[in-house]
Image (spheres, grey):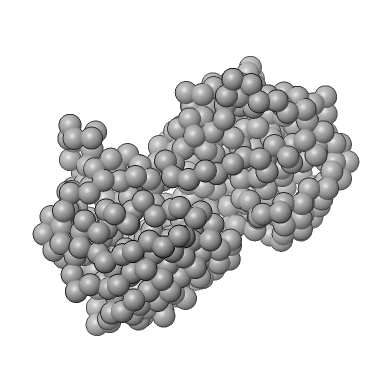
Amino acid sequence: MDKYVIHGGKTLSGSVSVSGAKNSCLALMPSTLLTEGKNIIFNVPEVNDTFTMIKLLNELGAKTKFENYKLELDTSHIVSQTAPYEHVKKMRASVYVLGPLLAKYGFAKVSMPGGCAWGPRPINLHLEAMEKLGAEIKLEEGYIIAKANRLHGAKINFDVSSVGATGNALMASVLAKGTTLITNAAIEPEIVHLERYLQKMGAKINGIGSSHLEIEGVDELKPAGITNIPDRIEAGTLLIAAAITHGKIKLLYKESEHIESVLTKLDDSGAKLNIEEDFIEIDTTDSDINSIDVTTSIYPGFPTDMQAQWTAYMTLSNGTSTITDNIYLDRFKHVPELVRLGANIEVRNNSAIVKGVKKLIGAKVMSTDLRASASLVLAGLAAEGTTEILRIYHLDRGYQKIEQKLQKLGADIERVTTKEY
């Protein structure tokens, strides 16, 4: 098992690129089950969640080839519609195979999903959407068992906008007979990119990019290729890495509109930003960190996946800030670890009250989930002395070699193999 050893206090500088979006790929990859033949996805990140999805698709019979961030998926000979526990337990996104398998083969047996260690995230919205499309759903021995001769068009309204449920409903409906209307659909960039990929396969989708989708089902889809979008959460994390260390970096990133809410908050906090078509420059070398409140919300609001990183940033602000998470109410497991580094934070219900301190001091801390891990790295970069971060396998799920990118910017961070748990 590996850990990070960070000798903090280094000001970050230089340029760095952003890897492909993990959350986008985890939707694009299972969508290829709707086709028969060779699909190609470019700009695929080398992260553990990608490899987990590859293993799951291999289990179903897909043939894959992954090198140089190019993933080929041959779905010509799918031999199984069962997604077993040993793969699905590793990440919640595995449930994305439900809709494609059900639509294409009329049957899906998918283990109840696992993944991050924080909070209940029920999949009832997924199942209700499948039932509206005509599926018979049973839950037996920890598995979702879904059957349908052929799905049919339906009206699906999500009481709560859900990225995962929108993706599953979308993938199921493109092969359903008739017209499907999805209202209050998620409009996150990852879902919009999935819509565009399905359209390239031959799906008939109106309203791409909006919360109201109209899908006219077709009899079959054809294999296609697409280039994955860059990872907006990695982009935001790297920008905060520069800001918390009073650094100046150039982020090679072409989708600034995907993180407009984060950029607005960084600007409010005192960071100087230069936003161009192909890059973002951030300069905080002569800036104090202003205390800025944040409330997470669905896209285009401030992302819940950036909440932990913002909390770390505010620990060194010049006042008191309140960070409220309205998406996942109990996503604050990073707080006790930040406190170990000297932060002054109090959690009240679904908010963290952060009183800025003059400095953080390095200590040994433990990762609990993907984004919490990122917050500890950010705090460790700014802390005086040495910070050791255990259980960094959480980070490996969603950040591609993040330590190498930080090293390129001048951080003193090293991955070390350890027996510590």
Which residue is found at the position 38% from the left and 45% from the top?
369
Residue 20 in the image: state x and y as whole percent.
46, 50
Task: Judge whether 376 appears above or below 59 on screen.
Answer: below
- The extreme front residue here reads 348
Rendered location of residue 229, percent (x, y) = 53, 54
Q: Quadrant of the N terminus?
A: top left
Q: Position of residue 19 (x, y in %)?
A: 42, 52
List x then y, in percent, for residue 60. 59, 22
Toward the left, the furthest residue is 385
Q: Is residue 317 above or below residue 102?
A: below
Frontmost residue, 260 versus 255 = 260
Residue 392: quarter of image:
top left
- Please say if 139 is above or below 413: above
Classify residue 86 as left or right of residue 381. Answer: right
Q: Residue at x 67, y 48 (%)?
A: 166
Q: How many marks?
A: 0
Quarter of image, res 327: bottom right
Q: Nearer the viewer, residue 371 or 220?
A: 371
Q: Quadrant of the C terminus?
A: top left
The residue nearer to you, when weighing 243 against 135, is: 135
Q: Is residue 415 visible to us here? A: yes
State left or right for residue 320 relative to residue 217. left
Residue furthest to the right: 178
| Res 237 visible | no
**Does residue 400 lie above or below 257 as drawn?**
above
Q: Residue at x 64, y 21 (%)?
A: 140
Identify the residue at image location x=77%, y=35%: 131
